[in-house]
Amino acid sequence: MTAALLRRAATAALLAGALLAGGCATVAPGEGQPEPAPYAANPVDPWERWNRKVFAFNEAVDEAVLKPVAEGYRKVVPQLVRTGIGNVLGNLYDVWSMANHLLQGKVHHGLDMGMRVLTNTLFGLGGLLDPATEMGLVRRSEDFGQTLGRWGLPSGPYLVLPFLGPSSVRDGVGLLADRQVSPSDLPDREAARYGVTALEVVHQRALLLGTTALVDQVALDRYSFLRDGFLARRRDLVYDGAPPLAPMEDFDDFDDEDDTPPSAEGAKRDDAKPATPAPGTQTRPPAPAPATRQ
């Protein structure tokens, strides 16, 4: 088991190195080919050029293979069966969520998730049904990336992984731990593991068919839209829905030459105007100017 984990970690390290090397490498455009349009520097996405290439690759794979399979899965498999598959997979992932709650020091939520797993396993036919939700034991999913963020590890640059989609350096590391306890590792045979992995991917893609259709309608730039949404959602999950407020910049609303606020400027202009005498009051005419001696 230890050797297998080491092999997987080494493979992941090589993949990450290849990604970073490819992201940092630049290729001079050939003669007659226009240079690619530069992207505005984004502090959260310094590898945007490389990420967009991986994103385009993932989109092509999804459009050619994954999306049609997910649509066929939704048409052929009855809703009741799909709900049962989702319940079983969710119950298995709830075990890992319980562990992450405890690793984050959220003992109360960890115990709730443990009760949820126990209830669905005993009274839900091994997780096929979900009586825990009806009993008020709400699912609070947690992964290892959230645990790392909970203990102060920054997310790092945004990263698009081949086949896996949006991520970050921190969440990519967390994904390595998450996959060690995924349902696909339960079967003993290799073929069964691939089958469970394929079922996970297709089932999850079928759940997102409506969401991706909405993104197609509202997003002018799918890449930026999904990147910003992913980063905002992950930040919200790390802080359990209450992320700290970002520091606001100090905007200088006053003129550089005069630090008087606009309201005071108006008051100065009003003071400069001659006061209009009230009705019924007498005003003294201005004194004549003294005569000058010729």
Image (cartoon, grey):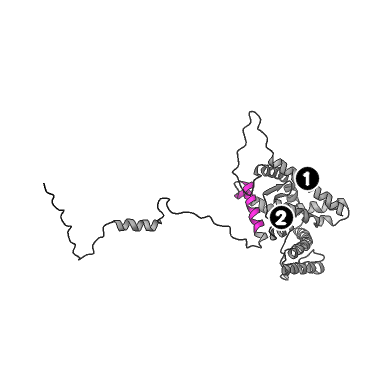
Dominant SS in magenta: helix
Residue 28 figure quarter: top right
Which image quarter: residue 272?
bottom left
How crowded is the residue under tag 1: few (<14 C-alpha within 10 Å), some, or many (20+)? few
Q: Residue at x 78, y 45 (%)?
A: 14
Which numbered tag is attached to residue 184?
none
Query: Which residue reaches farthest right?
Result: 189
First in sequence, mark 2 or 1: give its number: 1
Query: Disc 2 or disc 1, which is closer to the eye?
Result: 1
Could you tell me how far apart the alpha carbons at marks 2 and 1 are, in whole angstroms? 32 Å
Q: Which element type, helix, strand or loop, lies under badge 2?
A: helix
The residue identified by callout 2 is: 207
Task: Tell which of 98 and 129 is nearer to you.
Answer: 98
- Give me the residue at 75% from left, 63% from top: 103
Report whether residue 74 is seen. no
Q: Is residue 204 visible?
A: yes
- Which amino acid type corresponds to the residue marked 1 in the rendered image? Leu
Q: Nearer the viewer, residue 210 or 237?
A: 237
Q: Which residues are magenta?
A: 215-235
| Residue 213 pos. (x, y %) | 65, 50
Q: Are marks 2 and 1 in contact (CB under 8 Å)?
A: no
Which residue is under mark 1? 14
Counting from the top left corner in percent of width and height, residue 155 is at 68, 54
Local SS, label 1: helix
Q: Identify the residue at the far front of this view.
A: 293
Residue, x 68% and y 42% (percent of image)?
50
Residue 193 located left or right of residue 277: right
**Which amino acid type corresponds to the residue marked 2 in the rendered image?**
Leu
Report x, y in % for residue 43: 62, 48
Residue 138: image location, x then y, percent: 71, 67
